[in-house]
Structure formats: structure tokens, C-alpha cells
Image (cartoon, rainbow, N blue to C red):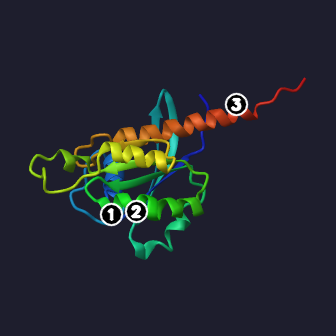
Amino acid sequence: MAQHRPLKIVVVGDGAVGKTCMLITYVEGRFPAEYVPTVFENYSGSVMVDGEIVPFELWDTAGQEEYSHLRPLTYAGTDLVILCFSIANEASFKNVEDKWVPELTTHVPRAPILLVGCKLDIRKDVEVPGLLSFVTYAQGSALARRIKAKGYLECSALTNEGVKEVFDQSIRHLLAKNQRRTKRHKCCLL
């Protein structure tokens, strides 16, 4: 089994779209009892993906505008960006193209992006139908294609639906990318 350096995955998106809750749910296996803006920060660990133990680092970022001057400090060495929006917040969806993609293009132009629609449970909540306008799966997929993301997933930190898949797909993409790079750089001396 090959030894990997820790993969650095940075999570970005507007404030209050579900980034920190998604991270806490993934790492701790439970939804946080109360909302506390961006207290997760960093987490180092390892996970078994397709029979390989893969070390990783997860970096949370503050999405609020007042932190925009600090956020670029987290981007150095980023292997992949998970770009989040809330499916119940059309402004956060619009900001993917208007704010986040330009910022990422400036600071981490080579890092692949995985687009994630958070708060899936709200779309499925039977008490809310008709009261809110939701971003559809088709809209999320179309946006992922437009921004050239490596994929589009939806998840709910509250119900834990799709959370593990977000991180597994991120790591699988990076492992495949590293494997392609290794094959390209092999040489044979005769």
C-alpha cells in the first residue's frame, strides 16, 4: 500500500450554508446541537477508501465578507476545494459563480472543485413545501458543469444523508489524480 502525504481539502461557501455542520457531522458522526459560526477550523485524520488508508486535513473557512482578507491564508497547498451553498438559499447559489469561483481562480487556480448543495433535509421537509424556493438537483448539476467542477453532490448534515459520500468522492478524485500523475512521470532507463 502506497504511503500518501495528507490531502488538504478546504471547504468554502457563504456563511451559514452548512459547511461547519457538514464537517462536524462527518468527523464526529453527529449533528452539532447549536449553531456556532466556524469553530471547526482544521481536522487531521485518515480514512479507509477503496482499501487504502488515506491521511487528510480538512480546513473550514468563514464565508462572511468580513473574513475575506483572511480566507486566502488557508489556500496554500490546497489539493481540493469543496464549494458549498444551501439549496434553500438562492443567494448562496448565485454567489458560487459571482464570488467563490473568481476567488478560487485567483488563489488556487489548479485545485479541483467539488460543488455541494447543503441542507438537503429542508427540501425534503414536509412542513415547508411551497414556502421556499429551492435550488433543484438539475440546477446544481448544471452549475457544476458551468464552473467545471469535478462533480455535484447534495447532503444533509442534520440527517447525515450524503455527508460521507462528499468526502469519499473528494478523496477518490484526488487518489485518481495522483495515480494519473504518477503514471505520467514514470520513466524507464535502459
- Residue 3: percent from the left, percent from the top? 61, 36
Query: What residue is shown at x 56% (from left), y 49% (from top)?
Result: 79
The residue carrying pointer 1 sits among few (fewer than 14), some (14 to 19) or many (20 or more) residues within 10 Å by Cα, namely few
Amino acid type of the residue tagged 3 in the rendering: Lys
In-front residue for pair 77/64:
64
Query: What residue is shown at x 41% (from left), y 45% (from top)?
Result: 142
Amino acid type of the residue tagged 2 in the rendering: Asn
When asked about the image quadrant of residue 33, the answer is: bottom left
Label 1, secondary structure: give it: helix
Q: CA distance from mark 3 to mark 2?
A: 37 Å
Side of 77 relative to 41 (left or right): right
The residue carrying pointer 3 sits among few (fewer than 14), some (14 to 19) or many (20 or more) residues within 10 Å by Cα, namely few
Query: What residue is shown at x 45% (from left), y 38% (from top)?
Result: 169
- Residue holding disc 1: 91
Q: Are marks 2 and 1 in contact (CB under 8 Å)?
A: yes
- Residue 136: percent from the left, percent from the top? 29, 46
Q: Quadrant of the C terminus?
A: top right
When asked about the image quadrant of residue 39, the answer is: bottom left
- Above or below: residue 25 compared with residue 35: above
When asked about the image quadrant of residue 38, the answer is: bottom left
Label 2, secondary structure: give it: helix
Q: CA distance from mark 3 to mark 1?
A: 42 Å
Q: Nearer the viewer, mark 3 or mark 2?
A: 2
Query: What residue is shown at x 37% (from left), y 63% (from top)?
Result: 14
Label 3, secondary structure: give it: helix
**Residue 76 visible here:** yes
- Residue holding disc 3: 183
Q: Which mark is residue 95?
A: 2
